[in-house]
Amino acid sequence: MAAIPELDDLITADETLATGRAIAAMQEPSGAMPWFPGGQTDPWDHIESAMALSATGLIAEAEAAYEWSRREQREDGSWPIRMVVGDIVDPNTDSNFCAYIAVGVWHHYLITSDVRFLEKMWPTVCSAIDLVVSMQAPGGQIYWGATYPMPDQASGSFPGIYHSALVTGNSSIHQALGCAVAIAAELDQPCEQWRLSLSLLGDALRSRPHLFEPKSEYSMDWYYPVLGGAIRGRAGQELIAQRWDDFVVTDLGIRCVDHRPWVTGAETCELVLALDALGDTADALELLGDMQHLRDPDGSYWTGLVFADGKRWPVEKSCWTSAAVVLAVDALSRTTPGNGIFRDADPQAELFTGREIRAI
């Protein structure tokens, strides 16, 4: 069996595996990964959970999740924003939700080296990324979503209603485009438009903040440009330092919203991943340790804690929170071949892979 991520004095391999198994226990027979049993499934958190399954060696379960994505993808390359036990609750499109399939597929391939899996998922990734790129504005930003009707496939036009571009979603798309380019390079497929889209998006995130609707009260808008690879190095360190005191709560993790006494596990672990990408291992380890109060004896993790009254809220153990923990442990421990999926999301370096791929 492949090595399971672990960190000395923080989380053992057995504990990480228990978290992976707790995530797998929430999987529906269809392969869908809902937020919690009987809850909603969205395409982004579904992939995040699949990535944690791969990282804990639960390969069959992970591939069942990717098969769900392949099977449920619509003809235009999208997925519904929200489904509940197979029923579509919100049929509209979120560009970030669509793009994230590329991150998951590349991560799974890095761990398994299974070319057949990559080839099988290529049409799914290609269709999704083509749709996302079609939602890019001239300034480089990508609109977060659109309401139906969806794109006219014959003309390539998009008659739906565009919505504003968001920093968090665009930062995640930035990583996804890089992973899509890496997949295309691995399969010797053309992807020049994706490369151009990635370059324009990165420039917009770094240089044209006015193009994005501000959501500055949310911690994700703070650290996601670093997590998604658009801003790194000294600029990334300065960005994190600017609002550290607004969001980080000593011994507990980070706030989801700057003015609310509520820390959340997933956001804390994503900041851990961002700090790891900046080389700030000490703070990353401390934060990962701080949020362990959310761990349940079965290995799963509660979503958050209202520290003003000591109550868990919402009262649910979300599989994507558990998944973020697994991915953070893997990144810091450098265990699986996919441990750098966030750290390597930097187009200024060798493109996302550590391999010789032509630079943008």
Image: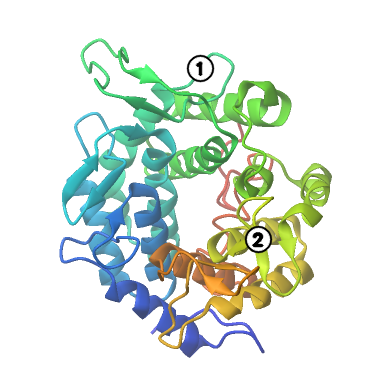
Comparing 53 with 94, the one in front is 94
Quick check: 268 above or below 344? below
Query: Residue at 44% across / 39% down in the picture?
Result: 96
Relative image position of residue 132 (x, y in whole percent): 40, 29
> Extreme front residue here?
309
Q: Which residue is mark 1?
A: 137
Frontmost residue, 193 versus 74: 74
Using the image, determine if residue 116 lies above or below residue 294.
above
Residue 253, picture quadrant:
bottom right
Between 285 and 57, the residue placed more toward the observer is 285
Above or below, 78 against 261 in this view is: above
The residue carrying pointer 2 sits among few (fewer than 14), some (14 to 19) or many (20 or more) residues within 10 Å by Cα, namely: some
- Relative vertical location of residue 175 with respect to residue 57 in this rendering, above or below: above
Amino acid beneath label 1: Ala
Q: Residue at x 32, y 15 (%)?
A: 158
Q: Quadrant of the C terminus?
A: top right
Q: Label 2 amino acid?
A: Pro
Could you say whether the residue bearing mark 1 is in a helix, strand or loop?
loop
Label 2 belongs to which residue?
Answer: 261
Labels 1 and 2: the sequence-earlier one:
1
Q: Of 187 and 334, which appears nearest the observer?
A: 334
Where is the N terminus found, in terms of image quarters?
Answer: bottom left
Distance (Cα) linking label 1 and label 2:
36 Å
**Residue at image location 36% in from the left, 18% down from the top:** 161
Q: To which quarter of the image does residue 287 belong?
A: bottom right
Which element is circle 2 on? loop
Q: Is residue 120 visible?
A: no
Q: Is residue 228 left or right of residue 137?
A: right
Task: Tell me residue 122's x, y (percent).
Answer: 30, 43
Residue 47 placement, left or right of 192 = left
